Amino acid sequence: AHAHASRGYDRLRLSFISSTTPAPGDYVAPFAYRWTDLSVSSSIVSVDEARSLGVDVILPPVGEGTVALWLADPCIASAFVVCLYGSVFETRRRIPELVNAAARGVDSWAVFGDNFYDLTGELTRDFFARLTPETQSRIFMTVP
């Protein structure tokens, strides 16, 4: 997500979730309650610093309007909760396809709510593995 205004326009929060040695960051810790086989590292960095770490970030021009795609409580599988229409509408395949198609015309995208109702991280790994590099270069927001 874009950093607070006082930090400057070219700064953003960069977070990595990893099952191996976490990337350096101002905050580095294993998850405590779920996804305990994973760690998170997070820092406020400049766009140039993010790019030096191999993260291609696209910011909209200063002062321009933005376009965003927001998803709330997406249900992609019945692994942990009943997902009545997941198989009918093939949401595990189609939601990443939707996000990839929309990425061409949005500045950011978000998942709000229960983040796939994923207790182990398996659904989240699968979802993000289906995203294109173009989609992954857009600012992503989430509120778990």
Image (spheres, rainbow, N blue to C red):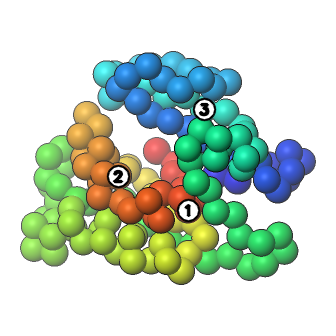
Q: What element carries label 1?
A: loop
**Dot 1 corresponds to which residue?**
138
Please name the amino acid that badge 2 sits on: Phe
Residue 131 position within the rendered picture, expressed as x and y whole percent measured from the top left: 36, 60
User: In this view of the protein, can residue 30 be seen by the observer?
Assistant: yes
Please name the amino acid that badge 1 sits on: Arg
Mark 3 or 2 closer to N-term?
3
Residue 127 position within the rendered picture, expressed as x and y whole percent measured from the top left: 30, 54
23, 7: nearer the viewer: 23
Q: Residue 42 carries which label?
A: 3
Q: Is mark 2 on a helix, strand or loop?
A: helix
Q: Distance between the residues labelled 1 and 2?
A: 13 Å
Callout 1 touching callout 3 (CB < 8 Å): no
Neighbour class for label 3 at 10 Å: few (<14), some, many (≥20)? some
**Residue at the farthest left position:** 88
Total marks shown come to 3
Callout 1 touching callout 2 (CB < 8 Å): no
User: In this view of the protein, can residue 85 be seen by the observer?
Assistant: no
Mark 1 or 2 closer to N-term?
2
Please name the amino acid that badge 3 sits on: Ser
Q: Residue at x 16, y 65 (%)?
A: 86
Q: How far apart are marks 1 and 3 (CA)?
A: 17 Å
